[in-house]
Amino acid sequence: MNPIISGASVIAAGLAIGLAAIGPGIGQGSAAAQAVEGLARQPEAEGKIRGTLLLSLAFMESLTIYGLVVALCLLFANPFVG
Amino acid sequence: MFFSLAAVEVGTHLYWNIAGLPVHGQVLIVTWLVIAIILTIAVLGTQNMQQVPKGLQNFVEAVYEYVSGIARDQMGEYEYRVWTPYIGTLFLFIFVANWLGALVPWKLIHLPEGELAAPTNDINTTVALSLLTSISYFYGGFKAKGLGFFARYISPTPIFLPINILEDFTKPLSLSFRLFGNILADEIVVSVLCLLVPLIVPLPVMALGIFASSVQALVFSTLSAAYITECIE
């Protein structure tokens, strides 16, 4: 196994998940903030707000998951090794 | 190619040769188990039905109301009845598969290679499920509009044609990667934590995994319903 390839793969895997977490993190934060604001304004709509929030959080989370899939590919099924 | 991080195994499978094709045996075993569980509950719950439900029938009816609610929320009152079986099957299969993988201590059963886990942690299962959704929305679109279905590729303007064609590929891709990544990530996090601190510490992550996997089942079925609705309206 070429040490440069494995080193680059490990760094790339770390970067993939790390960079992919930035955007969704910001997005989830603002979504949660808006949900809390909506709750404070309309406490009776709690169920609906919670459902929508969970669903949209899952969508945002999936962006990080794509980064994770790339990282897992690089770590466990690296196409550039051997 | 595949190497293991101490006790964490990724990419090792129990290969079976069926008609010359290598298949992942551990995935098939758990898949059959999931199907058996759902079928048993469904058959037992619908036998000898009463006007006033009680016991298992009550539970099965509640489950039916929930899954048809997922379809109804996306498709509206007129269309949802036809698609409830498909959306409900997706939801129930993914939900039971995820929870079975998270709740049953599969490590106690030793296989010659690989280990039993949720079938959704194999990319082949999730790709198959999301391709089923692709086929269903094409079928629904053709049935509703005939060849007029293709008008959706040049809407709102013909400039969007490449993007609209690309969407047919990104939809199953994102559906399958989302489910696969979430389940596999949860299992890897739990097993890495178990490796580092085998007591207590992995428990909150396991609870989070159980919650996240049920949300993923909901997301997968909701998104499938939304994609189908997009095409039949």
Image (cartoon, coloured by chain):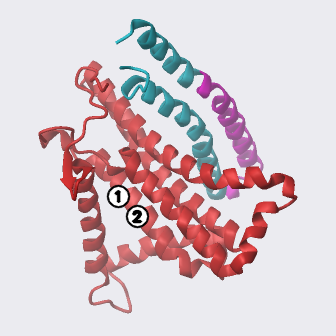
Chain colours: A cyan, B red
Find out whether residue A25 is within the magenta segment.
yes
The residue carrying mark 1 is B96
Query: What are the residue bounds of the magenta stretch?
Result: A19-45
> Could you say which quadrant of the image residue B210 lies in?
top left
Reply above or below: B77 against A41. below
Residue type at the position of mark 1: Val
**Of B175 and B167, the residue lying toward us:** B167
Quarter of the image for the C terminus of chain B: give it. bottom right
Report x, y in % for residue B52. 38, 89
Tell me if residue B110 comes above or below residue B57 in the rendering: above
Question: Relative to the observer, which residue lies in front, B212 or B131?
Answer: B131
Q: Which mark is residue B92?
A: 2
**Number of callouts:** 2
Q: Is residue B73 visible?
A: yes
State whether the magenta stretch is mostly helix, strand or loop: helix
Q: Work out which quarter of the rendered image holds the N terminus of chain B and state it.
A: top left
Q: Which mark is residue B47?
A: none
